[in-house]
Image (tube, rainbow, N blue to C red):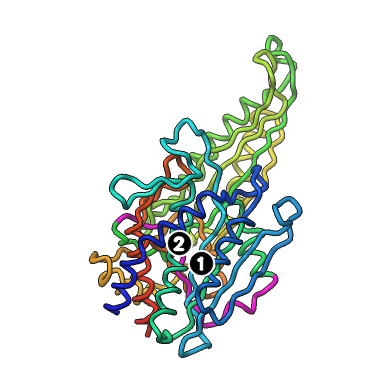
């Protein structure tokens, strides 16, 4: 272990090289104007080929809108002493767009190394390139050790995580379910904290709703001739947030925040000028609910609230789910959680903190297969914003932690 840790500490330069070559290959979904993950995948496959994996193959999803007409998914496996069981490291290759460039202090798609020679800036360096680098360095460390680990080490580098997983994990589960063994374990480095203390074992269910309120358009000077959809929608929005928060109000200290959340988000344009009363108004709500509540319960309450607005404002209210993700939790007493907690103490020198989160990761789909998954990493947790950053030392600590878990699994 000491020898492997020493070797990992010498990989800082390679970690920087990997980050640099990924950052300059923007893997942005075609759904939001990008070309996809093709160029990044080509580069990463070349790096993976330098490691003597026992298996290395693609499960590529066809997509005519993407470069190469595919959304690549790369699978690699290094055999352990027990070939029936695999510890998988899952990461996604795609990144979000840079957003407002005026808010960036550096070029988002050109890696910048800070004067401390450790902090790096660029779109994707944390979300999720740090996990990609950690996976590659872990495999390189194990392969160069000259010894087989107790079980297989697997790597999944997937597409389309930022836009719903249709061409990534969902495609893999549909086309190659045989890849996921009944005794497999999963580490997903897609959230965490700078100390590497947090171990995420549960996620709130995610429900996104689109609400459409239909009234009757008219001139704003003669409102009696119409039915104001914007006014009805505003009342609906208030009643929904107050009603849902009051109805589903259990607290759970495992999560932060420790309650289910119901938040108004996107609002569509309704009329082009001020003196028109809109006949249609559309808005969205993001709901993150505890696993103890069912989506049917939430929808039933929404229906009741919508009925009150229809009756009071003489409008029509319809709503639809635009995202629906729910999952089980990984048991706290699972061997994977215990091994990960032990690694946090040994490598990061802090006491682990078991948590649940509101955001969604690959872990939801994995847990729904009945397989254990933990999510954690040494990161700043600054994805999607301007000046995204991480530290090279963070990724080296992540590699040490994974190696510790792999070699200490009971």
List x then y, in percent, for residue 399: 37, 68
**Element assignment for label 2:** helix
Provide residue 205's location: percent of width, then percent of height.
52, 57
Q: Quadrant of residue 310?
A: top right
Inspect the magenta stretch and tell me whether residue 182 lies in it: yes
The secondary structure that most of the magenta stretch takes on is loop
The CA distance from mark 2 to mark 1 is: 8 Å
* Towards the viewer: 211 or 167: 167
The residue pinned by badge 2 equals 131
Q: Is residue 316 above or below residue 259?
A: above
- Pointer 1: residues within 10 angstroms few (<14), some, or many (20+)? many
Query: Which residue occupies 48% across, 45% down?
Result: 110
Marker disc for residue 90: 1
Q: How many marks?
A: 2
Task: Please give the name of the residue rendered at 63% of the width and 73% of the height, measured from the top-left corner.
Answer: 57
Q: Is residue 212 above or below residue 364?
A: above
Q: Nearer the viewer, residue 86 or 47?
A: 47
Image coordinates for residue 397, horizontal then vertical, percent: 32, 65
Q: Is residue 408 visible?
A: yes
Q: In the rendered structure, which segment of residues is drawn in magenta?
A: 175-194
Give the image location of residue 52, x and y in percent: 51, 79
Q: Is residue 265 magenta?
A: no
Is there any visible trace of residue 298 in the rendered image? no
Q: Residue at x 48, y 50 (%)?
A: 124
**Left or right of 144 on screen, residue 228:** right
Quadrant of the image containing the N terminus: bottom left
Q: Residue at x 62, y 56 (%)?
A: 39
Q: Could you tell me if the residues under marks 2 and 1 are in contact, i.e. CB atoms within 8 Å? A: yes
Q: Element at badge 1?
A: strand
Left or right of residue 173, residue 139 in this image: left
Viewport quadrant of the C terminus: bottom left
Mark 2 and mark 1 lie on one chain; the one further toward the N terminus is 1
């Amino acid at each position: 272990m000491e020898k492997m840790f020493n070797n990992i500490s010498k990989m800082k330069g390679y970690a920087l090289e990997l980050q640099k070559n990924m950052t300059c290959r923007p893997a942005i979904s075609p759904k939001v104007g990008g070309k996809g993950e093709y160029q990044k995948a080509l580069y990463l496959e070349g790096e993976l080929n330098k490691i003597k994996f026992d298996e290395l193959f693609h499960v590529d999803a066809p997509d005519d809108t993407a470069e190469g007409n595919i959304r690549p998914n790369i699978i690699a496996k290094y055999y352990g002493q027990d070939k029936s069981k695999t510890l998988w490291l899952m990461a996604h290759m795609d990144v979000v767009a840079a957003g407002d460039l005026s808010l960036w202090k550096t070029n988002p798609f050109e890696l910048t190394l800070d004067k401390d020679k450790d902090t790096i800036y660029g779109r994707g360096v944390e979300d999720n390139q740090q996990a990609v680098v950690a996976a590659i360095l872990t495999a390189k460390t194990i392969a160069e050790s000259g010894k087989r680990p107790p079980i297989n080490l697997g790597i999944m580098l997937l597409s389309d995580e930022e836009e719903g997983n249709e061409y990534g994990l969902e495609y893999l589960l549909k086309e190659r379910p045989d890849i996921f063994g009944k005794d497999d374990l999963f580490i997903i480095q897609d959230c965490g904290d700078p100390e590497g203390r947090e171990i995420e074992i549960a996620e709130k269910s995610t429900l996104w709703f689109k609400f459409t309120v239909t009234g009757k358009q008219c001139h704003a000077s003669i409102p009696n001739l119409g039915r104001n959809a914007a006014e009805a929608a505003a009342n609906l929005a208030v009643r929904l947030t107050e009603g849902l928060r009051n109805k589903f109000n259990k607290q759970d200290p495992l999560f932060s925040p420790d309650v289910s959340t119901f938040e108004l988000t996107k609002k569509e344009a309704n009329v082009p000028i001020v003196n028109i009363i809109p006949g249609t108004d559309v808005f969205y709500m993001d709901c993150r609910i505890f696993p103890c509540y069912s989506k049917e319960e939430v929808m039933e309450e929404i229906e009741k609230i919508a009925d009150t607005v229809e009756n009071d404002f003489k409008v029509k209210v319809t709503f639809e789910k635009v995202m629906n993700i729910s999952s089980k939790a990984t048991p706290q007493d699972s061997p994977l959680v215990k091994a990960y907690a032990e690694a946090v103490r040994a490598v990061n020198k802090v006491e682990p903190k078991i948590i649940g989160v509101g955001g969604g990761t690959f872990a939801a789909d994995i847990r729904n297969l009945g397989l254990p998954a933990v999510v954690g990493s040494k990161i700043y947790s600054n994805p999607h914003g301007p000046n995204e950053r991480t530290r090279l030392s963070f990724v080296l600590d992540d590699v040490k932690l994974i190696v510790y878990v792999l070699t200490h699994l009971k």
